[in-house]
Image (tube, rainbow, N blue to C red):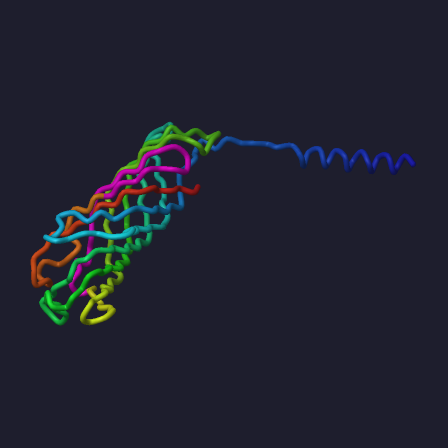
Amino acid sequence: MKKFHYIVLFLYTIIGFAQTDVKVADSLFREDQIYFSVSYNFLQNKPDNFSQYSFSAGLTAGVFRDFPITKNRHWSIAPGLGYSYNDLKQNIEIQTVSPYSPTPETGIVRSRMILHYLEMPLEIRWRNASPDSHKFWRIHTGLKASYLLGGKFNYESTTLGNGSENIKNVLNKFQYGVYVSFGFNTWNPYIYYGLNPIFDKDKTAVENNVTALNIGLKFYIL
């Protein structure tokens, strides 16, 4: 019977230790993150008779590596790598030098540009984070370079019907711009402003300087 009491006492002690919640603050914490954003694409420097319709979505997803640069780790630099999808809905016609040159007689009434990019952001970060909490205020600002992976032009025409063309050859291979995101915890307003045109000016029949402006929300997951 005494042995049974010893066994019960031993098991009770083990369970007690197992249920003890020991939290150790990490003074060398980083803000490495998975990120994704949802935004609306406003096109700037638009051609004449240009209008957008419906929701021109911009979606991004990727990862950051955080490198603190101050002792309290409130400031850091973070390079990242991600993917960007853009669905630009408008009534524009794309007139290229070759081989695809629609004319006003094509009857295109609505069109979409589907653009895919590999994006490489570099951020300067401020946050009032502490080792004890992952909920804090933040301001992230930086530069983003994007490499074109693919581009399609889908159209609806009263004379040609519906169709699709590969327009990768008339787009600038690299996009670059500045951005800022700020907020508390998970939810953060996000603004990106493109600094160079989407189209290669030497590949289009009509020169245009359309650039991107994305406004939306950015989400971070530690």
Which residue corresponds to the image point at 34% horizontal and 47% vertical from the top-left?
38
Give the main secondary structure, helix, strand or loop, of the magenta stretch: strand
**Residue 11 at x, y percent in the picture:** 77, 37
The magenta stretch spans residue 171: yes
Figure label count = 0
Which residue corresponds to the image point at 82% horizontal and 36% vertical from the top-left?
8
**Residue 160 at x, y percent in the picture:** 20, 71
Quick check: 143 above or below 85? above
Quadrant location, the N terminus: top right
Left or right position of 17 against 43: right
Quick check: 174 above or below 213? below
Task: Tell me where residue 136 sits by quadrant.
Answer: top left
Quadrant location, the C terminus: top left
In the image, the segment drawn in magenta is 169-192
**Residue 78 at x, y percent in the picture:** 32, 41
Left or right position of 138 against 135: left
Which residue corresponds to the image point at 86% horizontal and 34% vertical from the top-left?
5
Q: Nearer the viewer, residue 202 or 9?
A: 202
Residue sitting at the far front: 158
**Residue 47 at x, y percent in the picture:** 11, 53
